[in-house]
Structures are given as C-alpha cells and as structure tokens.
Amino acid sequence: MLQEMTKVSQVPGEPRRRWFSSRDFDLIVWLDDSNKVGGFQLCYDRQDDEKVLTWKAPDRYSHMAVDDGEGRAGRHKASPILVPGKAFQPGTLAEDFKKEAAGLPHAIVELVLEKIAAYHP
C-alpha cells in the first residue's frame, strides 16, 4: 500500500512535491501554488524491471526503464539512470496501481489513472 513520505526535500524555485511509496511503487506528484497537480512520476515494477511513467501538464509524457547501474563487470556500481523503456502495458499498470493507491487522495488517484489510460506511446 502506498504511504506518503513525511520528510520530502523541497527544491527552491521548483513546484512542491508529495511522495508516496510502497514496495513496488513510488509516486512523486508536483503541485502548483494552488495545489493543483502539474505533473507526476510513477515508478513501478521496482522489484523486477523498474519502469517510470512521467506526465507533465498539459500532456507531455515519457515512459522509461531504470538502469540500476549494476552488472558492470569489474567496475563499481554506477548511479541509476533512465533509459528507453520497455513495452507500456496500461491495463496491468492501472490495475496494480489501483490496489496500491487505496489510501491516497482520490483526486490524485483519478488523475494518475486518467493519464495512464490516455498515454499512447
């Protein structure tokens, strides 16, 4: 179940962030001065092959995979980076997100589900 992180660093000059996390998901939501969601980043499949869906208003999307920096023979672990993503499966993602998001604010859940359904790579 996604739980809100209570001590989220806020970057001066950037929109305020709320961060929700669970074993399989991270959801970072950016809010404007009137507390309207202006974007989000939904990280999912964190235990397997992590992917990230990013949406920014009005309708800019990206879907990427996370290269965790492991598996570099003879080299130290590198910092995780976003790389071109795997196939996007909106139905599976929406269902899994609904289960994890039961305790989140309804308006945020509905927006994320709406944007998952609207994204067509």
Image (cartoon, helix red, strand yellow):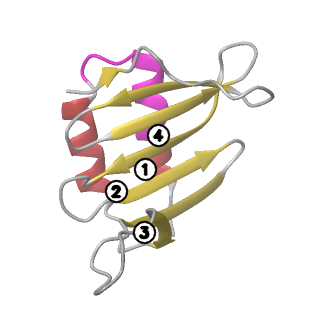
Mark 2–mark 1 contact, CB under 8 Å?
A: yes
Mark 2: secondary structure: helix
Name which of mark 1 and mark 3 comes first in the sequence.
Answer: 3
Q: Position of residue 38 (x, y in %)?
A: 67, 33
Give residue 117's mark: 1
Name the amino acid type tagged 4: Glu
Mark 1–mark 4 contact, CB under 8 Å? yes
Mark 4 or 2 closer to N-term? 2
Q: Which of marks 1 and 3 is in front?
A: 3
The residue under label 3 is 78
Secondary structure of the residue carrying numbered label 3? loop
Q: What element carries label 4?
A: helix
**Left or right: 92 in relation to 86:** left
Q: Measuring 19% from the left and 39% from the top, which residue is drawn there?
A: 23
Residue type pointed to by label 2:
Pro
Question: Which residue does the numbered mark 4 point to in the structure image?
Answer: 114
Residue 120, position as x, y percentages in the image: 50, 64
Counting from the top left corner in percent of width and height, residue 92 is at 23, 54
Label 4 or label 3, whichever comes before in sequence order: 3
In the picture of the structure, the residue carrying the numbered disc 2 is 90
- The quarter in which the N terminus is drawn is top left
Local packing at callout 1 (Cα closer than 10 Å; few below 14, some 14-19, many 20+) is some
Region of the chain picked out in magenta, as a range: 102-114
Foreground of the two, 82 or 76: 76
